[in-house]
Image (spheres, helix red, strand yellow):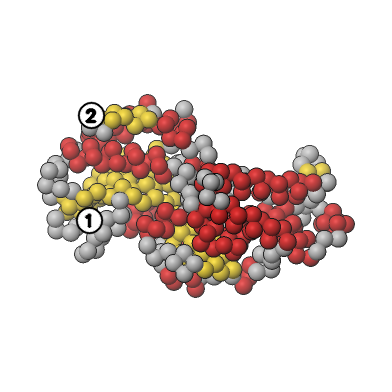
């Protein structure tokens, strides 16, 4: 079972009664760069620490999941006030790892020993499950079945997103469709992380893990990682990101309920009648109270499929390896309105169907 080898490492970071943050334990190992990243992300540093219960993000193609826990007198960690349990994995699956983090954290609180935690971790790696007396059994396969839809991102808010932005939601949809760079801003990390799974779910025919950066800080190593991608959806809680037009084509400001298209991206984001029709369609979906979130996701996926099928009908040229592509000549022969011609060209490029 491939999921059994997705886990890479496990770490414990503690904040003691003096306020010192200590890297306590690691199995098997992490790089210095990874260590610096999660020490910054775990939010245990500072005089007035507000523990964020669960955080997740990525470093390159590796995902990290951080569960932060308050320690009480009844726990078996006498000099520890808070600790962060960190899991590193190759797969994007927040629900799975939040559940596993919670189970491992409770075990660590009870025993105060990394050994008992390691036993559970290794059981998951080798058997795909682990069991504790108080917290029941964790089964990897439960989460595989649960996350077959929405690219491992089940907790989406597509209907709510459309209600928030109305017809302008089409800007987000188009940016995703054309594989643009999207930055989502919110000052609250908790709110930001709740919203981030929604964006990839608008493009069900693509993998969420390919584009999602749930939380980036404006520091050089993270920006270098981000900029190594041609397209992405990145969450940021630093308001200064709005001035960083080198990082985005489209900026979604959640608190202000504003969508900004960067000047350099406006030409490729020109709207057409097709865009208007899809925008109206999405607003109608959001207003349909009888429609579930999952149904709304499927309806949008069907609409996207129709659009891609129209594009494929223009792919009349075959490459030497048998692939059907769209040529400039084919588009010109259709004598389409300039905005639509421009959109179909950019969509064909995004779908790797354009003969350049």
Residue 332 x/y as whole percent: 85, 59
Residue 239: give its label: none
Q: Is residue 256 left or right of residue 18?
A: right
**Residue receiving disc 1:** 21
**Residue receiving disc 2:** 133
To which quarter of the image does residue 134 belong?
top left
First in residue order: circle 1 vs circle 2: 1
To which quarter of the image does residue 237 belong?
bottom left
Q: What crowding class fits label 1: few (fewer than 14 Cα within 10 Å), some (14-19), or many (20 or more)? A: some
Callout 2 secondary element: loop
Residue 240 x/y as whole percent: 44, 71
Residue 218 x/y as whole percent: 43, 65
User: Which residue is farthest top?
Assistant: 127
- Does the image show residue 211? no
**Which mark is in front, 1 or 2?**
2
Residue 152 x/y as whole percent: 49, 41
């Amino acid at each position: 079972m491939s999921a059994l080898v997705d886990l890479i490492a496990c770490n414990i970071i503690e904040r003691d009664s003096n306020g010192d943050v200590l890297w306590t334990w690691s199995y098997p190992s992490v790089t210095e760069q990874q260590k610096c990243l999660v020490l910054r992300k775990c939010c245990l540093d500072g005089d007035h620490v507000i523990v964020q219960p669960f955080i997740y993000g990525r470093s390159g193609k590796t995902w990290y999941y951080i569960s932060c826990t308050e320690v009480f007198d009844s726990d078996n960690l006498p000099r520890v006030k808070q600790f962060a349990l960190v899991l590193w994995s190759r797969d994007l699956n927040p629900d799975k790892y939040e559940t596993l983090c919670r189970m491992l954290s409770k075990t660590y609180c009870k025993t105060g020993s990394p050994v008992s935690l390691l036993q559970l971790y290794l059981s998951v790696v080798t058997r795909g499950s682990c069991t504790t007396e108080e917290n029941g059994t964790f089964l990897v396969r439960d989460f595989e079945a649960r996350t077959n839809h929405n690219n491992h991102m089940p907790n989406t808010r597509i209907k709510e997103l459309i209600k928030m932005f109305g017809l302008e939601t089409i800007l987000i949809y188009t940016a995703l469709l054309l594989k643009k760079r999207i930055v989502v801003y919110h000052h609250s990390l908790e709110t930001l992380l709740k919203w981030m799974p929604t964006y990839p779910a608008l493009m069900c025919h693509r993998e969420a893990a390919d584009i999602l950066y749930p939380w980036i800080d404006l520091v050089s190593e993270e920006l270098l990682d981000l900029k190594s991608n041609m397209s992405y959806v990145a969450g940021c809680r630093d308001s200064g990101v709005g001035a960083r037009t080198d990082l985005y084509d489209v900026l979604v400001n959640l608190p202000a309920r504003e969508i900004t298209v960067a000047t350099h991206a406006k030409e490729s984001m020109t709207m057409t009648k097709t865009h208007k029709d899809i925008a109206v369609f999405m607003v109608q979906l959001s207003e349909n109270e009888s429609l579930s979130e999952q149904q709304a996701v499927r309806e949008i996926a069907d609409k996207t499929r129709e659009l891609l099928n129209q594009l494929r009908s223009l792919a009349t040229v075959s490459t030497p390896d048998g692939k059907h592509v769209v040529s400039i000549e084919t588009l010109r022969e259709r004598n389409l309105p300039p905005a639509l011609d421009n959109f179909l060209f950019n969509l064909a490029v995004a779908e790797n169907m354009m003969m350049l």
